[in-house]
Amino acid sequence: MSVPARFTIRWWHWPLLAVGLLVSLVVAALLGMRTFGRSEFDTVISRLQAEGKPVALADFIARAPVVDPNAQETWDRWSKAAPDFPDYQKSERDDWDRWVSGHGPFPDTMAAKVEAHALGFQTGLTALRQHDLVISTYGWIAADLPPSKQLKPFLDVVRLPNLLGTRAMSEWLRHRAVLADDPRDYLEDSERFHHALTRQPGTLIDAMNAIACASIRD
């Protein structure tokens, strides 16, 4: 009858044991952090839901106001092809500023440019005057993310307001109001535009765009 060999601890067993314990501690710590983080996440989500805030893409889309799709499409197409305004030189801007402040002659060159761009802004103005536009992500999100596309690969297709187009409209309305004998129509257009920009911002970019255009208006 053979006698089983006696197990003998070798020196290299200790480093292996230490490494095993270290790995076990790291895994346990990571699992604990994940569990704690998930619990905190669920707590925050529950609180936001109780406050009526969107916590999922479907909730976000559900907050979108009812819009006229045709009017929104018209504005989107126009804004992406909007005239480049103001396209003045520094000297022309200086002449404009001096005239506005009452220290210079009428800026003929700048006035001519404002008038020359009038036709280019007409489509945008018509849409603004005839419809209650939503110039933010919310204006197009329902059309861009139908139920079949509310997945991550499609999120990049959601349209945002065209920054250059909105800036151009703000600048043109400001210049046109200053030059007009009766600025009330253009001031009302400016207020309509401000309302469309601030009616329901959906993203940080929407809010930044609205603030920038409000500064131009003011």
Image (cartoon, rainbow, N blue to C red):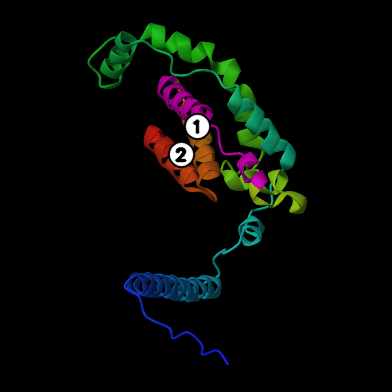
Quarter placement of the N terminus: bottom right
For the point 41% across and 41% down, which residue is it? 211
Region rendered in magenta: 153-179
Kind of residue sitting beneath label 2: Asn
User: Is label 2 in contact with label 1 (beta carbons under 8 Å)?
Assistant: yes
Task: Tell which residue pokes out farthest to the left in this image.
Answer: 103
Residue corresponding to mark 2: 209
Q: Is residue 188 left or right of residue 142?
A: left
List the residue tagged with mark 1. 163
Q: Secondary structure at mark 1?
A: helix
Q: Is residue 78 above or below residue 129?
A: above
Residue at (44%, 71%) from the top-left corner? Answer: 27
Helix, strand or loop for the magenta stretch, by majority: helix
| Residue 167 within the segment the image draws in magenta | yes
138 or 31, which is in the foreground?
31
Question: Residue 30 at x, y = what percent?
Answer: 43, 70
Label 2: state its secondary structure: helix
Decide which of tag 2 and tag 1 comes sooner along the chain: 1
Label 2 and label 1: CA atoms lie apart by 7 Å
